[in-house]
Image (tube, rainbow, N blue to C red):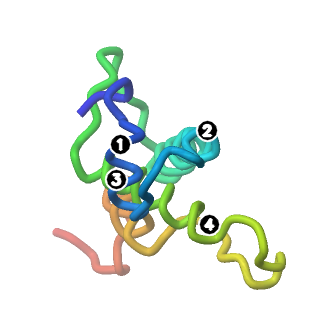
Amino acid sequence: MTLASIQLSQAKLVARVDGDDEDAALMQMLEAAQGDVLAAANYTAPEDGALPDDLAFAIYDQCAMLYDNRGGATERDRPLGLSLAASRICARYRGVSLGEVLE
């Protein structure tokens, strides 16, 4: 998967969005999600823009969370940070461990 192929149509499937009324807002959320996920994963995409499939899914899942929590909710009610799935995927790229000593 490449950064250029991060598609609005796939993001809409994951977010369960029908219709085209919110495409512009979803594109902004998709771009924000991409930045969030790549930064959290400490992942620099290669020059060809290729992304592992799990990171692409993390971007879509983060976008869906942003979409689900848009407007209406108070600041207190909105989740901060990454979606659960995106957090778990990004952790693998950061080398987060459970404190186990590997020999």
Pointer 3 residue: 93
- Neighbour tally class for label 2: few under 14, some 14-19, many 20 plus, Cα within 10 Å: few
Query: Which numbered disc, 3 or 4, marks the residue closer to the eye?
Result: 4
The first of marks 3 and 2 along the sequence is 2
- Residue type highlighted by circle 4: Gly
- Neighbour tally class for label 3: few under 14, some 14-19, many 20 plus, Cα within 10 Å: some
The first of marks 4 and 2 along the sequence is 2
**Which numbered marker is on residue 66?**
none
CB-based contact (under 8 Å), mark 4 and mark 2:
no
The first of marks 2 and 1 along the sequence is 1
Snapshot quadrant of residue 32? top right
Helix, strand or loop under label 1: helix
Q: CA distance from mark 1 to mark 3?
A: 26 Å
**Which numbered marker is on residue 81?**
4
Pointer 2 residue: 24
Query: Which numbered disc, 4 or 1, marks the residue closer to the eye?
Result: 1
Q: CA distance from mark 4 to mark 2?
A: 22 Å
Pointer 1 residue: 9
The first of marks 1 and 3 along the sequence is 1
Query: Which numbered disc, 4 or 2, marks the residue closer to the eye?
Result: 2
Query: Is 6 positioned to the left or the right of 40 in the image?
Result: left
Q: Quadrant of the C terminus?
A: bottom left
- Residue type highlighted by circle 2: Ala
- Residue type highlighted by circle 1: Ser
Q: Quadrant of the N terminus?
A: top left
